[in-house]
Image: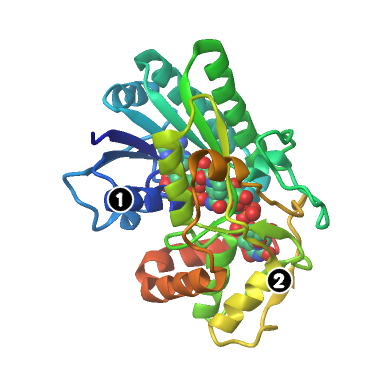
Amino acid sequence: MARNMLVTGGAGFIGSNFVHYVMEHTDDTVTVLDKFTYAGNEASLAGLPENRVRVVRGDICDGELVDQLVSDTDIVVHYAAESHNDNSLHDPKPFLDTNIIGTYTLLEAVRRHEKRIHHISTDEVYGDLELDDPERFNEHTAYNPSSPYSSTKAGSDLLVRAWVRSFGLQATISNCSNNYGPRQHVEKFIPRQITNILIGERPKLYGEGLNVRDWIHADDHSSAVLRIIDQGRLGETYLIGADGEKNNKDVLELILETMGQPTDAYEHVVDRPGHDLRYAIDPTKIRDELGWEPAYSDFTAGLEATVQWYRDNEAWWQPQKAATEAKYREQGQ
Ligand code: NAD
Ligand code: DAU
């Protein structure tokens, strides 16, 4: 049976990739609820079937609007968030509003209308690991967030858990590692470096670049979320990762090599305050319990395709680029 999904944040990076994925792999229809902040982009939803995708411009903190949209849906898939750590260090307030109050507003509507919600979260709620720690994050790791961004995501996860326990809310949660792929805002690491090279600017590495991120392609994140929606147990949390650990310096050198540049053609800039050292996901639960496997096992090939997407879609990213770099320049980054 085809469902109607309410996808919050569906005009952002991962949300829009999810909507494209749902169109290709299911018969479901989607209502996107997005505030179109600096991170939302109408062009990310271009070309989707009009009879299956409706776009509503609005705020997840708007209780009346949220109530009406939730009442008309079968399931809420909640991506909307303020998502960038660096921004949260300079202006935390929008992170509290959207990530905490926005999530609370959705939870109350889902409770009133007895619907299902899947809450999208991040591995950053667990804090960071030492480089040589043999352990990876799993569903039992204690929460220990570092930044205003990750602490508000941790807060939103705890709200979902409390609504499950106290009110029997029909909810699942997933915590995913760093995504890469098309349609990611140029403020983020991989698109920033690719587009810097494309405009003749040198890439910028924070500190020594030894920090490790666990990369996963956005389509693999989408397939995992769909699997949880279809087969996940209510009330459960699933970690999503694809064994993609790499340090930032290695990723940057690979981008430079892929784009035909000398691998040392970049600058070291001031490090991020409180910069998490390493994230790493143990995806055993989702693999064993739900039989999910990532499709993108070759990071180099996935990165090459991503570079090609930014080469082919300058009209998508060019309008964001100057303002993003101006903001970074003010911060010395
Ligand atoms: P993004 O910043 O690219 O997109 C966020 C979207 O939410 C934008 O379209 C924005 O307009 C919308 N939005 C913001 N505030 C809103 C509000 N108040 N009401 C309605 N819409 C609003 O973010 P992303 O990287 O696509 O991340 C999406 C989700 O996935 C977030 O919840 C994030 O925490 C989570 N996540 C991201 C990653 C990653 O690597 N990017 C990894 C794991 C989890
Ligand atoms: O782990 C999941 C998280 O991944 C998500 O929850 C966040 O929404 C998402 O933004 C991402 O957070 P990070 O802080 O890891 O991503 P970012 O792209 O900002 O940075 C990745 C790494 O690259 C990080 O160690 C900082 C570094 N960096 C970043 C930028 C923008 C640089 O060295 N240079 C840069 O110019």
Quadrant assignment, res 95: top right
Q: Residue furthest left?
A: 51
Q: Is residue 143 above or below residue 259?
A: above
Residue 25 got which mark?
1
Give the left or right position of residue 42, taking residue 239 as reference: left
Q: Which residue corresponds to the image point at 49% horizontal and 45% vertical from the top-left?
A: 291
Residue 121 at least partly seen: no
Q: Which one is in front, 144 or 27?
A: 27
Q: Quadrant of residue 207?
A: bottom right
What distance separates the C-alpha of mark 1 from that of mark 2?
A: 35 Å
- Observer-side mark, 1 or 2, equals 1
In the image, 30 versus 82, the foreground residue is 30
Q: Residue furthest top?
A: 166
Residue drawn at point x = 34 percent, y = 21 percent: 67
> Element under label 1?
helix
Left or right: 282 in relation to 180: right
Q: Quadrant of the N terminus?
A: top left
Residue 74 on image: x %, y %: 31, 27
Mark 1–mark 2 contact, CB under 8 Å? Answer: no
Residue named by callout 2: 249
- Colour basis: rainbow
Tell me which corner region of the image, top left, top right, bottom left or bottom right, holds residue 284: top right
Q: Is residue 285 visible?
A: yes
Q: Residue at x 55, y 81 (%)?
A: 258
| Residue 190 picture location, percent across and down | 56, 66
**Is 269 on the left-hand or right-hand side of 69?**
right
Q: Secondary structure at mark 2?
A: helix
- Amino acid type at image mark 1: His
Mark 2 is on which residue type? Lys
Specify which label sits upstream in the sequence, 1 or 2.
Answer: 1
Q: Quadrant of the C terminus?
A: bottom right
